[in-house]
Image: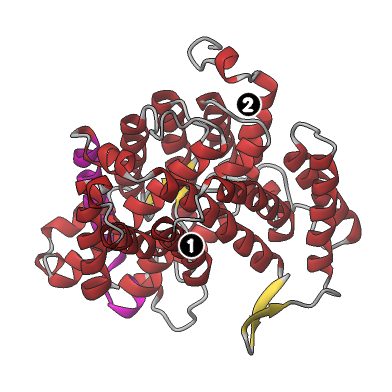
Amino acid sequence: MKKYFQFEELGTNYRREFVGGLTTFLSMAYILAVNPAMLSLASVADFPNELRMDQGAVFTATALAAAIGTLLMGLLAKYPIALAPGMGLNAFFAFTVVLVWGIPWQHALAGVFISGIIFILLSLTGVREKIINAIPEELKYAVSAGIGLFITFVGAQNAGIIVDGATLVELGDLTSGNVLLAIFGIFITVILMTRGIHGSIFIGMVITSIVGMISGLINLPNGIVGKVPSLAPTFGAAFDAFSDSSFYSLNMLVVVLTFLFVDFFDTAGTLVGVANQAGLLKDNKLPRAGKALFADAASTSVGAILGTSTTTSYIESSAGVAAGARTGFASIVTAGLFLLSLFFFPLLSIVTSAVTAPALIIVGALMVASLGKIDWTKFEIALPSFLTILFMPLTYSIATGIAIGFIFYPITMAVKGRFKEINPVMWGLFLVFLLYFIFLK
């Protein structure tokens, strides 16, 4: 096992990998509660019940899709990267495709399935890997830093430290109990990190959870073991759409293309960002990128069959990397915990946003360190890098930040006279992103 995952070469051990895998799981465990509520449109009061997805089935599908995808990533690509149904994509699935456009959720699942199949084909042919390896080194560093700012913003917002206001965003109510708990978690984690204690982020989350329960801010779990909800209401429902003539429409083409686009570049950004943080990039290339992309693509189709929206690589994996994870063994640990969560779902109620926010904020600070590797003295590189970084948190989208920065990179490089240094793939991406903003965005 140690030899297969190259423990000695990467300077890790079983304890660090286990703590890293556990930290990643705790950082993204919220999806087990959020995804069922999102896809079932639980917050929409006047939506017909017969048109909703079954929450219990979606929960089981979410846990299984995450376990299968993460296991594939760990065994095939050997990366400490976990997968689960992606936030943002599930919102598009539920609130745009189903609620606004009136497309049945079975059809939406079919759209996710098709996008996954296309991804598999692109991964097997090596197209996705070539695209990622063609991205200039400076933009990869910008992607990593931009994701750092993005997850810091997400963590602060989830905890209520940053809220919507008259100026779009403003400081939240610092006297609120949950906000104070999150701030306490940040201080504890910062102290542990400064002292150089391994697993600081995980330990900080545990301490924060305990303090939250003692103070009454986090409710004690109602039970330890619960019944696993049936998968029957959603399993294989995606295939029902193919026999329905209304499935073949322009709207469904837009659905598939949107799932395809967002997952493609969110995954690329996550893989590059986490791999860079873990020190796994070699000569500006991602080793075993093809296997990592295949695992991600296959997980999307499997998740659709089970009954959930697009399964994708999670940036929260960076929390596990910060806690010590360096190999796919951490992913195996995370996958196992997702399977266990099927039986111990009541315990996940203690993992609130106040508990996960400190981890996201601290990890964001670590990822922004890649800013120092960008040559800010060269405007042709500085501008697209800056736009990539800036627009990820401002648009609340990793993919949009990448798109804006990648549009400007060929322009500034060409105007500067460095035309020959532009990889043809970057010109192709330039055109794709322009068309995306014109016709889809």
Q: Which mark is residue 372?
A: none
Q: In this rendering, would 48 be left or right of 221? A: left
The residue most toward the front is: 417
Q: Is residue 347 above or below residue 411?
A: above
**Residue beneath the point at 63% across and 59% down:** 152
Q: In this rendering, would 91 be left or right of 335? A: left
Quick one: 314 or 435, which is closer to the camera? 435
Quick one: 433 or 425, which is closer to the camera? 425
Residue 440 part of the magenta segment: no
Looking at numbered disc 1 in the image, what kind of residue is underneath it?
Phe
Q: Where is residue 226, by image quadrant?
A: top right
Mark 1 = which residue? 386
Mark 2 = which residue? 17
Residue 376 picture location, percent across and down? 51, 55
Residue 88 picture location, percent across and down? 44, 63
Q: In this rendering, would 141 be left or right of 153? A: left
Which-is-in-front pick, marks 1 and 2? 1
Task: Tell me the colour scheme of the image.
Answer: secondary structure
Start and end of the magenta stretch?
A: 98-123
